[in-house]
Amino acid sequence: ALYLNCPELQDLNINSCTNLQP
């Protein structure tokens, strides 16, 4: 689950992605 997968939200990236979202 990498933060780079934010647009894909394959795993629990939803939580991490929200943190990296500009």
Image: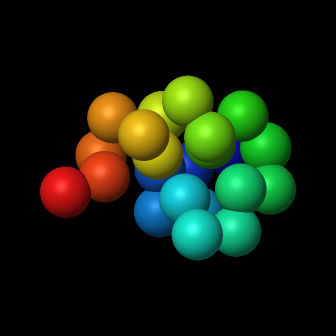
Count the marks: how many?
Answer: 0
**Residue 4 % position (x, y):** 47, 62
**Residue 11 % position (x, y):** 79, 44
Q: Quadrant of residue 10?
A: bottom right
Name the residue located 70 percent from the left edge and 68 percent from the top edge.
8
**Is residue 9 shown above or below 8?**
above
**Is residue 5 shown above or below 11?**
below
Name the residue located 31 percent from the left edge and 52 percent from the top edge.
21
**Residue 19 % position (x, y):** 33, 35
Question: Which residue is farthest left?
Answer: 22
Screen quadrant of the C terminus: bottom left
**Residue 14 % position (x, y):** 62, 40
Name the residue located 55 percent from the left edge and 50 percent from the top edge.
2
Q: Quadrant of residue 1?
A: top right
- Horizontally, residue 22 falls left or right of residue 13, namely left
- Horizontally, residue 7 falls left or right of residue 9, namely left
Name the residue located 55 percent from the left edge and 30 percent from the top edge.
15
What kind of colouring is applied to the model shown?
rainbow
Question: Which residue is farthest right?
Answer: 10
